[in-house]
């Protein structure tokens, strides 16, 4: 089933069918002019009727869209070669040497145009060469006098020009679609930012203020609410645009957004550019490690994030000054079905082709060292 997305080269297909009509009219005039000189004029008229019917079918197929596929263009190529070679059925050897095929090389150029629109300039020019080869096979020779016989130059030029036009149209359409998606994503981000500001941030600010006023046991909750309020405000004000998959992004601002009252960062002064998919997975692993600090390291624990650019690889260290992880605790968590560390951190790093090393102990805090290679994520 064909995609319902608009075809960016539709105007070229319409123009090509205009050329097809003119080439058929020219072929009709040529047929009328040379029919009396042919050995089998009646057969030539029958073949011309088939040619007209085939061109009507091609025009309908390309204009309505169902013919804009490899199979149909290849079929047109085969039919074109057959029509050119059929000249031997209706004309003498002497006539074939002195004239173009009865279907005319102008009409045969239609397949060069179709191939160029469908496949681009390289295969468009290849179709033009097939037109020339079919004509050479008919005459058992090929003229290298480009001053008198410029057909090969014309075929190659048509394939190149139309193919480049189709390629440019598709690239421009892809860029427009990408810009539209980015604009829509930015608009949605702005909308969500307004909702977060009017909802969650206001509530957290109220909890923080009222908790400090009440004091006592609620003071700790007020402090946590204040931290989350400030983190949300930093996230909302960051305003970074979404990045296409496969593009490179700077890891520095991504990790800087993790700063809070309990998280400090040490980051290079220069950008650290890595694949966007790798950056997203690495940032998610860092987020999971920092969430574990909040949940398990203790109320007063502070986390430190260090980013190192080693050229071929990038290393992110997440260290905290909390209570640490007792021996055997990770194995016990895995036995209980809680696999956050093994899947969210270790699993992510393995998928990226990197590694995750954990150093911890009772009372010594916890340190993760996440190493990933530069470049595209495995499997992306």
Image (spheres, grey):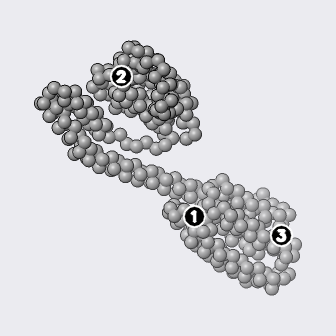
Residue at the image position 44 percent from the left and 54 percent from the top = 176
**Nearer to me, 117 or 87:** 117
Residue 369 x %, y %: 47, 22
Residue 120, relative to residue 37: is it above or below? Answer: above
Which label was assigned to residue 297? 2
Q: How many marks?
A: 3
Image quarter where the N terminus lies is bottom right
**Nearer to me, 117 or 165:** 117
Q: CA distance from mark 1 to mark 3?
A: 44 Å
- Residue 232 figure quarter: top left
Q: CA distance from mark 3 to mark 2?
A: 91 Å
| N-terminal-most mark, 3 or 2 | 3
The label nearer to you, 3 versus 2, is 2
Which label was assigned to residue 257? none
Residue 99, relative to residue 343: is it above or below? Answer: below
Residue at the image position 62 percent from the left and 60 percent from the top = 118
The label nearer to you, 1 versus 2, is 2
Residue at the image position 58 percent from the left and 40 percent from the top = 379
Which label was assigned to residue 2? 1
Q: Is residue 206 visible?
A: yes
The label nearer to you, 1 versus 3, is 1
Image quarter where the C terminus lies is top right
Mark 2 burial class by Cα count in 10 Å: few <14, some 14-19, many 20+? many
| N-terminal-most mark, 1 or 2 | 1
Residue 289, relative to residue 184: is it above or below? Answer: above
- Residue 236 figure quarter: top left
Is residue 10 rendered to the left or right of residue 137?
left
Residue at the image position 74 percent from the left and 63 percent from the top = 131
- Please tell me whether mark 1 sits on a helix, a strand or a loop: loop
Q: Residue furthest left?
A: 213
**Nearer to me, 121 or 10:** 10
């Amino acid at each position: 089933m064909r995609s319902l997305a608009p075809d960016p080269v539709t105007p070229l297909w319409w123009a090509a069918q205009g050329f097809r009509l003119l080439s058929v009219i020219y072929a009709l005039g040529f047929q009328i002019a040379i029919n009396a000189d042919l050995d089998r004029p009646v057969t030539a008229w029958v073949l011309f009727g088939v040619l007209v019917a085939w061109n009507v079918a091609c025009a309908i197929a390309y204009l309505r869209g169902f013919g804009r596929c490899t199979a149909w263009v290849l079929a047109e190529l085969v039919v074109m070669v057959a029509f050119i070679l059929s000249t031997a059925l209706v004309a003498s050897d002497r006539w074939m040497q002195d004239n173009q095929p009865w279907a005319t090389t102008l009409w045969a150029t239609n397949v060069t145009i179709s191939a160029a629109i469908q496949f681009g300039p390289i295969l468009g020019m290849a179709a033009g060469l097939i037109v020339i080869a079919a004509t050479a096979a008919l005459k058992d020779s090929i003229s290298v006098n480009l001053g008198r016989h410029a057909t090969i130059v014309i075929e190659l030029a048509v394939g190149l020009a139309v193919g480049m036009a189709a390629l440019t149209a598709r690239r421009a359409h892809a860029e427009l679609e990408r810009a539209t998606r980015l604009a829509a994503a930015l608009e949605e981000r702005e909308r969500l930012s307004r909702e977060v500001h009017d909802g969650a941030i206001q509530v957290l600010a109220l909890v923080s203020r009222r908790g400090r006023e009440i004091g006592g046991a609620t003071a700790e909750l007020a402090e946590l609410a204040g931290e989350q309020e400030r983190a949300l405000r930093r996230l909302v004000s960051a305003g970074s645009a979404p990045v296409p998959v496969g593009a490179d992004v700077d890891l520095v601002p991504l990790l800087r957004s993790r700063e809070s009252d309990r998280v400090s960062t040490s980051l290079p002064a220069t950008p650290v550019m890595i694949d966007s998919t790798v950056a997203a997975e690495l940032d998610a692993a860092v987020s999971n490690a920092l969430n574990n600090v909040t949940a398990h390291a203790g109320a007063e624990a502070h986390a430190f994030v260090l980013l190192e650019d080693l050229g071929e690889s990038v290393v992110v260290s997440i260290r905290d000054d909390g209570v640490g992880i007792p021996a055997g605790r990770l194995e016990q968590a895995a036995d209980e079905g809680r696999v956050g560390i093994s899947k969210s951190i270790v699993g992510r790093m393995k998928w990226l082709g990197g590694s995750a090393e954990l150093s911890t102990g009772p009372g010594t805090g916890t340190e993760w060292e996440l190493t990933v290679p530069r470049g595209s994520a495995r499997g992306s």
